[in-house]
Amino acid sequence: MKRMWFCAVLAVMGAAAAEIDVDGGFKDFQRNWRTSSKRRGIAEVVPDQGVNFVHLASDEGPSGHVGVYTAKGIDAVRGCKITIEAEVSGGPLEIALYEYAEKKFAGAGRKNFPVRKNRSVLRAEFTVTGEKTDQIRVAFRVRRGAAAVISGVKVDMVPAQEEVKAK
């Protein structure tokens, strides 16, 4: 299984929004999802003319769901505003923002989207809520029996206000 490349660029200047490049930067999900006894399905990269498409397809069954998340954490604190956009077909699909505090899972925000027969851009907005959150990860997941193709992932971050960071 080909591993997807990761490039996280975070050049935050003051309170200006920054785009974080996560397109293609997802965890080696083959090892984590496909071989798990509890989660069954397909998660593969399909490169086409310089664009990486992620194909997620979950098997039927009570524990059937497959997902991917960014390989490395992205620095963020409480109050940061995160906007995730992706070109998607298929579904239903869940876009999530996982929060971590000192490298431990601290919670998640999730947005669910219905099946999309035609390729369209989905947009999910989140605000980091955990008091001790220091990193986030962007995730996509399909539930049992569903399949989706994802590409063109863009993440924008508006940093928290200075008074929020001081807490």
Image (tube, rainbow, N blue to C red):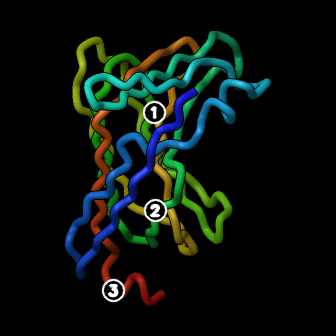
Specify whether 91 is left or right of 105. left
- Please, what secondary structure does the residue beneath circle 1 have? strand
- Please, what secondary structure does the residue beneath circle 3 have? helix
Q: Residue at x 32, y 44 (%)?
A: 124
Residue 33: image quadrant is top right
Which residue matches tag 2?
Answer: 74
Q: CA distance from mark 1 to mark 2?
A: 20 Å
Density class for disc 3 (Cα within 10 Å; few <14, some 14-19, many ≥20) is few
Residue 34: give x, y in percent of width and height: 67, 24
Which residue matches tag 1?
Answer: 94
Q: Nearer the viewer, residue 2 or 162?
A: 2
N-terminal of the pair, mark 1 or mark 2, is: 2
Q: Nearer the viewer, residue 115 or 138?
A: 138
N-terminal of the pair, mark 2 or mark 3, is: 2
- Please, what secondary structure does the residue beneath circle 2 have? strand
Q: Residue at x 41, y 22 (%)?
A: 46
Which residue matches tag 3?
Answer: 162
Residue 26: give x, y in percent of width and height: 49, 42
Mark in front: 2 vs 3: 2
Q: CA distance from mark 3 to mark 1?
A: 31 Å
102 w.r.t. 32: above or below: below
Density class for disc 1 (Cα within 10 Å; few <14, some 14-19, many ≥20) is some
Q: Residue at x 42, y 27 (%)?
A: 54
Mark 2 residue type: Ile
Specify whether 43 is left or right of 49. right
Are the two marked residues, 3 and 1, in contact with CB atoms closer than 8 angstroms? Answer: no
124 w.r.t. 128: above or below: above
Q: Residue at x 54, y 69 (%)?
A: 133
